[in-house]
Image (cartoon, coloured by chain):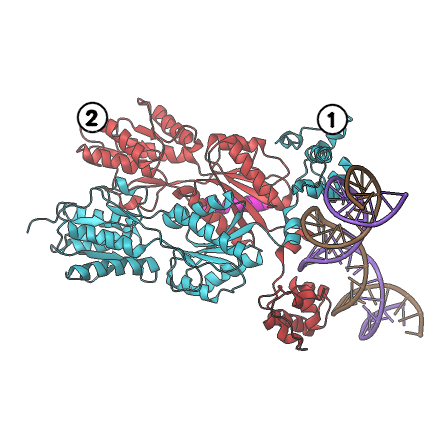
Chain colours: A cyan, B red, C brown, D purple
Amino acid sequence: MESGDDIGPAGSGDDGLPASRARTRARTRAPVMSDVGRLAGVSHQTVSRVINGSPHVRPETRERVMAAMQELGYRPNPVARALVTGRSKTLGVVSFDTTLYGPASTLFGIERAAHESGYFIIVASLEALNRSSVSDAVERLRRQGVEGILVIAPHAEAGEALLDTPFDVPLVAAEAGPEHGAPVVAVDQVAGAVNATRHLLDLGHRTVWHITGPPDFIESRQRRQGWQATLRAAGVEVPEPLVGDWSPRAGYELGRQLSRDPEVTAVFVANDQMALGVLRALHEAGRDIPGEVSVVGFDDIPEAAYFQPPLTTVRQDFIEMGRRSLRMLLRTIETGRRASTEPLVPPELIVRGSTGPAPAR
Amino acid sequence: MESGDDIGPAGSGDDGLPASRARTRARTRAPVMSDVGRLAGVSHQTVSRVINGSPHVRPETRERVMAAMQELGYRPNPVARALVTGRSKTLGVVSFDTTLYGPASTLFGIERAAHESGYFIIVASLEALNRSSVSDAVERLRRQGVEGILVIAPHAEAGEALLDTPFDVPLVAAEAGPEHGAPVVAVDQVAGAVNATRHLLDLGHRTVWHITGPPDFIESRQRRQGWQATLRAAGVEVPEPLVGDWSPRAGYELGRQLSRDPEVTAVFVANDQMALGVLRALHEAGRDIPGEVSVVGFDDIPEAAYFQPPLTTVRQDFIEMGRRSLRMLLRTIETGRRASTEPLVPPELIVRGSTGPAPAR
DNA sequence: CACGCCTCAGTTAGCGCTAACATGCCGCGC
DNA sequence: GCGCGGCATGTTAGCGCTAACTGAGGCGTG
């Protein structure tokens, strides 16, 4: 791009050539199509043809137009184009707390994929996780004229909110339960929990305790379900699960409870942050990991490999999730009808140092 | 144009009542201002007045118009409005790796603040951290018609790229060094490093070792500078700093090096993730924390309080950073000229269990 | 009672672009 | 020689909205 240098504040001199106009008008009005046309000696429509790559333009004319655009530092006005074509080339993403690793990574994957497809992403983050705030965000994005909406909705109520969602806007949900109106892209939480639990049982543990996330998160429910099903299938006792809130603090508090019970030799924690708290509580209680107690987390946050001991956990490929959901949204936009739900993305068990054979009794 | 109802596949019958059209056209063309006007028995301009809260509308008329909007499910077309007003109510954010806690939180703060001010945020994340990719992202956002741009630019080269940036778009840099063309909002990294280092010296440590971030990050440089200046001022030896890359892995590797040197009793690590690696390395080497070695991190990520031991660190208020930079950008847009750089946001030392008095020698 | 002025509404003219049609020109076949 | 079709371009008409003017009616003022 050559235009970089003709916009700066320094270019004051008038060297007589029309080229200097780009400089002097720096803070004037931006050039429009007909300005380009005038300079190139063609109509604005021909300029439009050049921009949109119409085949019916003589190469020579095309050259002249390009030169004129260059000279004026012309850039097409996307708003005007969007008005007439009805396509804004923007997509909306509704997300809760993009500070967390999961949503942040998903958003990142979405953005990357969108960029590759020539779309822009408008984010609307939620103040609170409830039905009306989701509908609200969706509504705001529609008002803004997005072509489609992606909802990162790990929360049950958020998922329900999608039912209120008007059908005239393409919409895809990521990380939501399968029970709602919109097509869903998600990681197979149940499978992840099954793998984690099975891993612990395979190590010889009599049964596996569980710390869940907040009950209104779909992921919490599904992980719990996978854990419970696995224990049932194995015909072992299903201990009462402890309910956390995803925070390391909750993990710590609940970990202290568990550490008092000598029966507890294996814990499946619903996310890595809580698992961190559990590790700490067990450590403080003098319980050896994995000698006396084994711990499995969920997510595989970048820190997990450096916990003490390194955390065995279930990896979710959030970036891939983002890409997939974007692809699905684009498909929905193109075909004009809601796509069906995609196959679940399989998670992967990453075995590290926080799990080991059950202690001899 | 009356063509609204001859577009849909279903709209064949003429049912006479305008009211019922709202239903039948559900999946047809979206209603526009004149549809509302017609239904309410006023001109489209009066509808516009109602929407924009003009005082010169009789309450009764206003009522009728509102009712008509309601009935048709009318929503104003933001694109058309943007075209005529020249204001898109969107801002662009350029950011590198929004997967990391810092940028993610800053983005979150920005988005919140933008929402409060009635703006939307378009994100453009960077593939790579270099000059051209930043200019590129800025360019893309301009093309999209944003009113202003916020660059989260912790990287030196990214900061330099701002120099290439055209002056005709309001632009604010967050987390950048002060040396560039754009106004900057940032946390006082030097002060943070000084506090951390001073804290360790005050505990009686002879000197303080340092693990830096990648040298091309401004934050790395400033933290290193604050650390070095403090040691110099105290008249103590300045050990050669070790260079990391922000990752826990790097912290671990470098921590292992440090753990071999019995002289090392205090380490200031440039971020919490690397500090985690250091804790682990020291632990494996059998060095007691904080008995034998004290460790201080930087950032205060949510996990830090649950490391073993809980990490003493320097807290940066990323959300506040986001808010401030957004405020500054809006000011720039309103006043039409680039604001001057804001005073630095002071960080806060959070003392936890990873630091203690120097061991007796 | 004429005049000015305010209130409330309507009419008109774009914003910058694309889509659809119109036009002039060329070469071709009969 | 003349019509005909395709190419390269111009002209016109909007997209849905706001801004700016226009106009009708009501009311206070000298």
Residue in the foreground of this view, choosing between B17 and C11: B17
User: Is B329 one of the magenta-colored residues?
Assistant: yes
The percent position of residue B144, horizontal first and vertical second, equals: 59, 45
Q: CA distance from mark 2 to mark 1?
A: 66 Å
- Amino acid, disc 1: Gly
Residue situated in front as seen by the camera: C25 or A313: C25
| Local secondary structure at mark 2 | loop
Q: Chain of mark 2?
A: B
> Is residue B205 rendered magenta in the image?
no
Per the rendering, the mark at residue A45 is: none
**SS of the residue at dot 1?**
loop
Q: Is residue A246 above or below residue A353?
A: below
Q: Quadrant of residue B5?
A: bottom right
Residue visible at 57% across and 41% down in the picture: B140
The residue pinned by badge 2 equals B262
Whether residue B303 is visible to the viewer of this picture, yes or no, is: yes
Estimate how packed mark 2 is, as few (under 14), some (14 to 19) or many (20 or more) residues with alpha carbons within 10 Å. Answer: few
Residues shaded magenta: B318-331
- Residue B103 place in picture, x, y as percent: 43, 42
Quarter holding the N terminus of chain A? top right
Of residues B281 and A357, the one drawn nearer to the viewer in this rendering: A357
Question: Is residue B268 toward the left or the right of residue A359 in the image?
Answer: right
Q: Which residue in the structure is indicated by mark 1?
A: A13
The image shows residue A76 at horizontal and vertical percentages of 66, 43
